[in-house]
Image: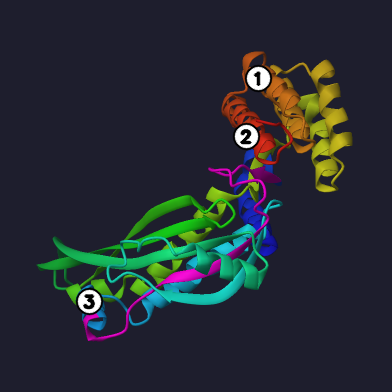
Amino acid sequence: MKNQSLLLLAVVALMSWSCGTSSTLLEVLQPSQIVLPEDIKVVALIDRSKPEKGFANFMEGAFSGEDFGQDREGRRLALQNLTTTLTRTPTLQIKGTGVEYTGSKNGKQMLPPLNWDEIKSICSKYGADAVIALESFDSSSDISYSQSSYKSKQKDGTEITKYTHTARRNVRVYMGWRVYDPKLRVVVDENTTNESDEDTATGDTQDRARNNLRSQLTAVRELAAKAGDSYGKRIAPVWVNVSRTYYTTAKGADKDAMEQAHRLTQAGKWEEAAEVWNDLLNTARDPKTKGKAAHNLALAFERNGNLSKAEDWASKAYTQYGNKTSQNYVYVIQQRISDQARLDYQLKKVKP
């Protein structure tokens, strides 16, 4: 997670370097989509999507064009990424169990819920308050081809017709999840997801175009990992990194002050940088510089968790000084304020 964050920051910084801006990453606690019962603190993870063995299941995979072991890898990556995502929540502790059950014959459908004695047994064995189950998993794909022609001039001056073949593969992953609460004897969440992605590749023959596609196994792995991460964010508040852009340069007499503030941010001295931006609001003659300073102050307040002040300064940057970039930042902050209200409820800081 840390390495990915550093890579993202480096890429964004490189892109913005020539534009008089820089970027910084903020760690934000993102609210979940649903609220689990307050007494669920520890969850046990099981896999109930294991396919049946046998010739019929093998033939289904062959006819659907599956790579060998792709569903097994997909299940593993979905569970692994769910686990990784839930390590970034302050509300849940997740325990891997290695428990596997055979799922339905049709991987797109879930079996009826497990019986409560089984759920209680799992919770007792692993010291959990609830069970998260991957209830179903299936993947499928289809591929189509098209052809286009173009004229190619030869060394002797003659023209010949050549063909470009295009292969398009659509890969789909279907998953079903349940969260079992044995205390209430209720399935507190039941959710199905359908992730899909399309790859396109070209070649001078149909076979070469197909061979230039990303492997189907790779596509399934990536979609399954994405689905596992998404389900973790559905059921628990999760820390995520978000990128923010701020201004580093100005023209004329304000150039040195703006560059000084940038150096302060690079040294982690955001409060001192904010003092420079505040001074520029009083001394700068160019309205554009004032707009940049106001935008940067909004970011400084967001970093400190003062979202109300951040909204005020972003709004001033746009409405008073005409900084168009700040208009979108106002919407971002307003969404964060809305998210924070939901988050306060989820963390029980505000009673329902």
Percent position of residue 107, x then y: 31, 67
Q: Nearer the viewer, residue 46 or 193?
A: 46
Q: Residue at x 72, y 18 (%)?
A: 286
Task: Find disc 2 in the rendering and name its residue.
Answer: 342
Task: Find disc 1 in the rendering and name its residue.
Answer: 315
Say what amino acid the circle numbered 1 marks: Ser
Q: Which is more N-terminal, label 1 or label 2?
A: 1
Residues marked 2 and 3 touching at CB (< 8 Å): no
Percent position of residue 242, x then y: 64, 45
Give the number of marks.
Answer: 3
Q: Residue at x 60, y 59 (%)?
A: 85
Q: Which is more N-terminal, label 3 or label 2?
A: 3
Rendered image quadrant of residue 59: bottom left
Whether residue 39 sits left or right of residue 121 in the image: it is right
Q: Residues within 10 Å of mark 2 (few under 14, many from 20)?
A: some
Percent position of residue 308, x then y: 72, 24
Q: Which is more N-terminal, label 3 or label 1?
A: 3
